[in-house]
Image (spheres, rainbow, N blue to C red):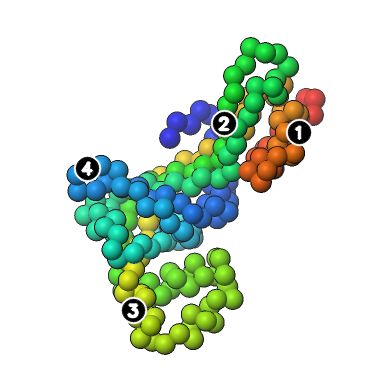
Amino acid sequence: MYLPSQFDPKDPQVAIDIMRAHPFASLISTDDAGLPFVTHLPVHWEAQPGQGAAHGVILGHCARGNPHWKYLQQRPQGVVTFMGPHAYMSPKVYPDLARVPTWNYVAVHCVVEANVLDGHDAKDALLKQLIADHEPAYADQWRGLSEDYTTKMLGAIVAFSLNIIKIQCKVKVNQHRPEAHARMLEIYDAGGPDDQALGAWMRKMGLTGAPQ
């Protein structure tokens, strides 16, 4: 992605925090015609030290009827994107009128190498990870389902692990416009959830709007 240096947090932990906080990702690779093929799906990031994935591994699955897993088998490299909070920003935040609107946002892009996992145990382990992430109380219900039912459900999906071989993180909150920070925080704090989240990101990065 286009990543001006002022929007690069240069801290690997920031990307990890974004992937964990916004796990509904877009997996992008190519189909048999060479066109981009996109699947939107919940994923789980985890560290795997010593496993050849310096930035960790993304675990996910798709329906067996979705051809994406076949494309990953044939052409394992792809991109996974994570979109954090995003919102419009009016030029009224600036002290002068010779300005234009913008859109601020937080995002992570990962170049990945896919490994398709079609075994029962691997898929069961992956589902338990996703259950632990989103509804831990459901784990007992899943374990209590009949073997026939769980076997049928597991047979309807294909899992994959995606080794992250390159990662980019972008936190665009107009770091390079300090004259607007105080007014931006006022607007973000009074806005909706995405606006408030961007305000929190500004504060994480020390952009408090206070005179330097």
Residue at position x 59%, y 76% in the image: 137
Tell me the quarter of the picture where residue 41 sits: bottom left
Instruction: Kindly check if marks 1 and 3 are in contact, taking CB atoms under 8 A apart as contact.
Output: no
Secondary structure beneath dot 1 equals: helix
Label 2 crowding class (10 Å Cα cut-off): few <14, some 14-19, many 20+? few
Comes first in the chain, label 3 or label 4? 4
Residue at position x 43%, y 73% in the image: 125
Residue at the far right: name it: 211
> To which residue does mark 2 refer?
103
Label 3 crowding class (10 Å Cα cut-off): few <14, some 14-19, many 20+? few
- For the residues marked 2 and 1, what is the alpha-carbon distance in whole angstroms? 16 Å
Question: Where residue 134 sits in the image (x, y, percent)?
Answer: 56, 66
Instruction: Kindly check if marks 2 and 1 are in contact, taking CB atoms under 8 A apart as contact.
Output: no
Q: Using the image, determine if residue 55 lies above or below residue 107.
A: below
> To which residue does mark 1 refer?
186
Secondary structure beneath dot 3 equals: helix
- For the residues marked 1 and 4, what is the alpha-carbon distance in whole angstroms? 46 Å
Query: The C terminus is located in which quarter?
Result: top right
Comes first in the chain, label 1 or label 3? 3
- For the residues marked 2 and 3, what is the alpha-carbon distance in whole angstroms? 45 Å
Query: The N terminus is located in which quarter?
Result: top left
- For the residues marked 4 and 2, what is the alpha-carbon distance in whole angstroms? 31 Å
Secondary structure beneath dot 4 equals: loop
- Can the viewer see residue 17? yes
> To which residue does mark 4 refer?
34
Question: Where residue 37 sits in the image (x, y, percent)?
Answer: 30, 47
Question: Where residue 57 sits in the image (x, y, percent)?
Answer: 43, 57
Residue at position x 46%, y 59% in the image: 43
Residue at position x 26%, y 57% in the image: 67
> To which residue does mark 3 refer?
152
